[in-house]
């Protein structure tokens, strides 16, 4: 158990010895059972996002493919990557991630068909009538979801459709097509891949509040109208300075009670760097609490962390002075958060707990 060894060294003040440990010295699983296996014992998945540039990092891939039983592509399935020119599709990068998942018996969350961000220039800069944009959207969804038909567990069909106050986000789709674009997108996704679970996905949805209330109202309406929707994804981009979302479990439960699956889809817990023992302990506690919240809700199907190592986190590039958000450090060594997730999963998977 190399990370326990590392923790012992740290306790003994031999931190430099850890720093000197080459990252590749301990690749692969750190215990006899993996996070994925522990999650599977509770009929859940424990996944990690990944991204194509990381495929040249063998030590990274070894852990990704062994420790987790689900993955998603952090960028490869977004519109800018899959339809870089109008009507010209490229699934090379997405296929690379999916192939890896299949080889390693991981389920695959597909992310994302409709999002206002990372759109190709031709779409961002174009001027389209409602009819034209509807045709573009339909063709994009049908073509991409058909390409992955039968191969993905779920699709984040529409990503980040609402503002913080619960109003619709002003995107090219909302502006041009009105709120009905969401129902249309879900219907086209179902048409293209009848077996993929169809999700709406967003951030700052963890606590009960105006934004999650807006989703609650919308998915209730969609279900009442017979629009195909299977789940809601709670991204889970948390930050120590903003406090833990205490109503998470209750919030997950109220969506589940509508007859939906729920999932934590992009979990990371950032902090101001440098990290210290106290911050890492709080972070570990939060990872455990999120894990337990999901495990306590029968229809919470799993947790995906937004990559597993600080080496490849999106945080430092976007939030200046913040980072250390993931359960493995930059040297691919497990942090206290890793053990916290493990313990939460293991406790839940013990016979008699469910
Ligand atoms: O592809 C270019 C590359 O050509 C260029 O050399 C490089 C230089 O910066 O940039 C590359 O693009 C980057 C892209 O990721 C692909 O690596 C962008 O700059 C960068 O902004 C982009 O960040 C992604 C971000 O979404 C964009 O909003 C992150 O990797 C990705 O993890 C992140 O994921 C989102 C989810 O999709 C939705 N929820 C929030 C989450 C975090 O922002």
Image (tube, rainbow, N blue to C red):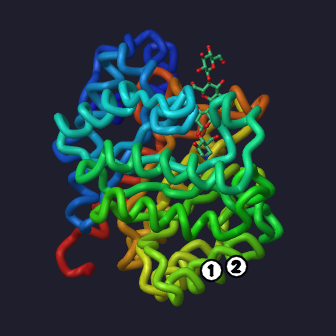
Q: Nearer the viewer, residue 106 or 21?
A: 106
Q: Residues within 10 Å of mark 1 (few under 14, many from 20)?
A: some
Q: Nearer the viewer, residue 214 or 347?
A: 214
- Label 2 sits on residue: 213
Spatial CA distance of label 1 from label 2 is: 5 Å
Q: Is mark 2 within 8 Å of ligand 1?
A: no
Answer whether residue 30 is visible to the viewer in this image. Answer: no
Q: Residue at x 38, y 71 (%)?
A: 295
Location of residue 184 with respect to 213 vertically, above or below: above
The numbered dot on residue 282 is none
In the picture, measured across the screen, residue 315 lies left or right of residue 346, that is right
Ligand 1 picture quarter: top right
Q: Where is residue 38 in the image (x, y as percent from the top left)?
A: 25, 56
Assign the N terminus to one quadrant of the image.
top left
Q: Residue at x 20, y 64 (%)?
A: 41
In the picture, measured across the screen, residue 319 lies left or right of residue 83, that is right
Asked if labels 2 and 1 touch by Cβ distance under 8 angstroms, the answer is: yes
- Label 1 sits on residue: 216
């Amino acid at each position: 158990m190399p990370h326990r060894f590392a923790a012992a060294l740290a306790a003994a003040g031999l931190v430099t010895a850890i720093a000197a440990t080459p990252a590749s010295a301990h690749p692969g699983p750190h215990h006899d059972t993996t996070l994925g296996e522990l999650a599977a014992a509770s009929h859940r998945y424990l996944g990690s996002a990944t991204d194509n540039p990381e495929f040249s990092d063998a030590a990274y891939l070894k852990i990704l493919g062994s420790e987790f039983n689900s993955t998603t592509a952090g960028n490869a399935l977004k519109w800018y990557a899959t339809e870089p020119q109008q009507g010209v599709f490229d699934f090379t990068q997405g296929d690379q991630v999916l192939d890896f998942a299949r080889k390693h018996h991981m389920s695959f969350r597909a992310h994302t068909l409709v999002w206002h961000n990372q759109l190709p220039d031709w779409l961002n800069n174009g001027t389209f009538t409602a009819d034209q944009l509807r045709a573009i959207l339909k063709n994009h969804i049908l073509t991409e979801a058909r390409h992955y038909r039968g191969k993905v567990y779920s699709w984040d069909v529409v990503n980040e459709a609402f503002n913080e106050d619960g109003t619709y986000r002003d995107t090219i789709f909302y502006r041009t097509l009105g709120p009905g674009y969401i129902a249309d997108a879900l219907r086209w996704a179902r048409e293209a891949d009848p077996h993929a679970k169809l999700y709406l996905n967003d951030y700052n949805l963890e606590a009960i509040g105006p934004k999650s209330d807006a989703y609650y109202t919308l998915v209730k309406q969609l279900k009442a109208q017979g629009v195909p929707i299977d789940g809601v994804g709670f991204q889970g981009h948390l930050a120590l300075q903003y406090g833990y979302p205490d109503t998470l479990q209750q919030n997950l439960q109220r969506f589940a009670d509508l007859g939906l699956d729920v999932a934590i889809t992009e979990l990371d817990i950032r902090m101001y760097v440098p990290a210290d023992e106290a911050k890492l302990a709080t972070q570990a506690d939060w990872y455990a609490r999120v894990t337990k919240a999901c495990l306590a809700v029968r229809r919470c199907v799993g947790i995906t962390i937004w990559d597993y190592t600080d080496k490849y986190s999106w945080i430092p590039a976007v939030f200046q002075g913040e980072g250390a958000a993931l359960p493995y450090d930059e040297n691919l060594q497990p942090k206290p958060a890793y053990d916290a997730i493990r313990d939460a999963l293991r406790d839940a998977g013990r016979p008699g707990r469910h």
